[in-house]
């Protein structure tokens, strides 16, 4: 099958290289010329496990990077929209990139003769596809939905650091579509996947994506709140979570207490869902609390530092781990950002290290001291904050240091002045 993927971000490139590897012909379009230039040279614009290996294998064979839409659209029967849907300053979803790509697709569709299926992979608030996306494509293409083209919503549940594995091994495929929609192409595309395939309405598919992210972030804020109470009680929240997880109604996953969730999805999607609910005159108290607990969580480390030292102003604080989780160079919404901001407010000396995220964090905080080696950071700091669960932090020498471990990384605490965040 010939497929055009619009948007060369995490979701777009994983989708594009995934299908290319499954022997489909994929055109990957982005209007960011720098990204396309890099891809044409066989380089990725970001790190994601496994993608770099797939790129040269498929480049200019099953995978073509392009900055012009018309040729690829004409040749493709399916078009995947994978552009970002960030937050506006007021928390509402910013649909600018979606509108822009629908307009571009619409204008280019005008001259295409064959029937096209357009798939929305980007996360969009329920009813967006029905009320905004389809009308925009119809307007700019002068074509009619289900006569000249179809639109489906197939949300993606990729986790960064694991996206390619998630692509090849999805736990379910959700297909949102108009009732009378034709399934031939989609059924062919997913024929090699063995997981359950659920066909629902467009808006239901959109809501499944939001509800999944809201539920996962709810689990994290829940266990962080329990963890904060455990800390006051002198208990270990990881033992508590372990005991809870055997109940199949609860399950053992996403119950790792820590400095709060980060990343490109949870916060923005919660904010967008809250705003949507409010626009419908509903106050989503639980969703608001998930964010509130999460906003407070990184600052717990600051309270611990203040509790430990009478005088903090001459302390050198070493932050180990800057990405929002291990296995990625992505720092978006990383708890480390909120911790560093507060340390800057307190005028403390900040040292920072990450195995992958240094270049991205340097753009945000150019004036703090970065180390190329984690042991050197430890040797030169008074307090060590372990903020990301990189496995290489496990066996460093922390002897004689005050260490606040927010992710339960260290096993050997002999000779270490050790403090757990929620244990
Ligand atoms: C998330 C969803 O998992 C994925 O399905 C969706 O498509 C995009 O958003 P991602 O942001 O890549 O994926 O990472 P995820 O592994 O879910 O972690 C998100 C944040 O939660 C990280 O900061 C992580 O450290 C934190 N987390 C996760 C915890 O603090 N505790 C946990 O138990 C799990």
Image (cartoon, rainbow, N blue to C red):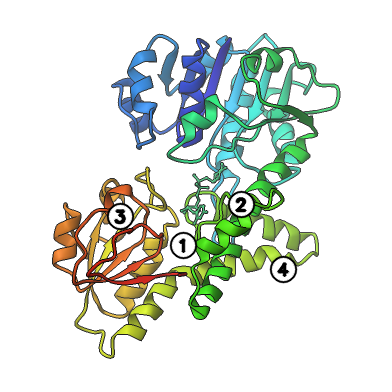
Q: Which quarter of the figure has residue 368?
A: bottom left
**Sequence-first tag of 4 and 3:** 4
Q: Residues within 10 Å of mark 4 (few under 14, many from 20)?
A: few
Query: Residue at label 3?
Result: 361
Q: Which residue is mark 4?
A: 285
Is label 2 within 8 A of ligand 1 (CB to nearest ligand atom)? yes
On the picture, is 80 further left or further right than 198?
Answer: left
Disc 1 target residue: 258
If the image is split into quadrants, where does the C terminus sit? bottom left
The residue shown at (31%, 80%) is 346
Q: Is 80 drawn above or below residue 321 in the view shown? A: above
Mark 4 vs mark 3, CA separation in Å: 33 Å
Residue that mark 2 sits on: 216
Mark 1–mark 2 distance (CA, rounded to whole Å): 14 Å
Q: Position of residue 231 (x, y in %)?
A: 49, 75
- Viewer-nearest residue: 323 or 242: 242
Q: Name the quadrant containing residue 137.
A: top right
Q: Dot 2 lies on which element?
A: helix
> 401 or 45, which is in the foreground?
401
CB at disc 1 and ligand 1 closer than 8 Å: yes
Q: How far across and down, in percent of the image, does residue 68 sit? A: 46, 21
Closest to the camera, between mark 3 and mark 2, is 2
Considering the numbered disc 1 on the image, is that residue within a helix, a strand or a loop?
loop
- Residue for point 67% across, 12% down: 188
Which label's residue is closer to the chain start, 2 or 4? 2
């Amino acid at each position: 099958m010939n497929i055009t993927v619009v948007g060369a971000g995490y979701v777009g490139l994983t989708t594009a290289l995934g299908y290319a590897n499954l022997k489909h012909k994929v055109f990957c379009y982005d209007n960011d010329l720098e990204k396309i230039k890099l891809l044409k040279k066989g380089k990725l614009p970001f790190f994601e496990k496994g993608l770099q290996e797939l790129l040269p294998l498929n480049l200019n064979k099953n995978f073509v990077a392009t900055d012009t839409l018309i040729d690829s659209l004409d040749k493709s029967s399916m078009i995947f929209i994978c552009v970002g849907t960030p937050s506006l300053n007021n928390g509402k979803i910013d649909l600018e990139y979606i509108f822009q790509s629908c307009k571009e697709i619409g204008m280019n569709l005008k001259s295409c003769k064959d029937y096209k299926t357009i798939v929305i992979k980007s996360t969009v608030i329920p009813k967006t596809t029905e009320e905004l996306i389809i009308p925009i494509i119809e307007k700019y293409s002068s074509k009619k939905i289900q006569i000249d083209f179809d639109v489906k919503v197939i949300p993606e549940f990729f986790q960064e650091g694991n996206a390619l594995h998630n692509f090849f091994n999805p736990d379910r495929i959700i297909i949102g579509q108009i009732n009378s929609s034709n399934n031939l192409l989609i059924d062919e595309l997913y024929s090699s996947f063995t997981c359950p395939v659920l066909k629902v309405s467009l808006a239901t598919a959109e809501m499944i994506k939001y509800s999944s992210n809201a539920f996962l972030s709810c689990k994290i804020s829940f266990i962080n709140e329990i963890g904060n109470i455990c800390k006051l009680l002198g208990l270990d929240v990881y033992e508590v979570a372990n005991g809870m997880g055997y109940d199949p109604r609860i399950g053992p996953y996403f119950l790792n207490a820590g400095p709060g969730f980060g990343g490109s999805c949870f916060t923005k999607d919660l904010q967008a869902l809250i705003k949507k609910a409010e626009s419908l005159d509903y106050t989503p108290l639980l969703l608001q609390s998930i964010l509130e607990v999460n906003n407070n969580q990184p600052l717990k480390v600051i309270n611990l530092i203040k509790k430990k030292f009478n005088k903090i102003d001459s302390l050198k604080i070493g932050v180990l781990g800057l990405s929002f989780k291990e296995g990625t160079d992505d720092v978006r919404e990383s708890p480390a950002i909120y911790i560093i901001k507060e340390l800057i407010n307190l005028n403390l000396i900040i040292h920072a290290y990450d195995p992958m995220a240094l270049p991205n964090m340097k753009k945000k905080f150019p004036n703090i001291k970065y180390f190329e080696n984690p042991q050197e950071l430890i040797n030169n700091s008074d307090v060590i904050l372990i903020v990301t669960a990189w496995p290489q932090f496990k066996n460093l020498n922390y002897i004689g240091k005050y260490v606040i471990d927010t992710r339960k990384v260290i096993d050997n605490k002999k000779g270490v002045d050790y403090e757990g965040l929620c244990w």
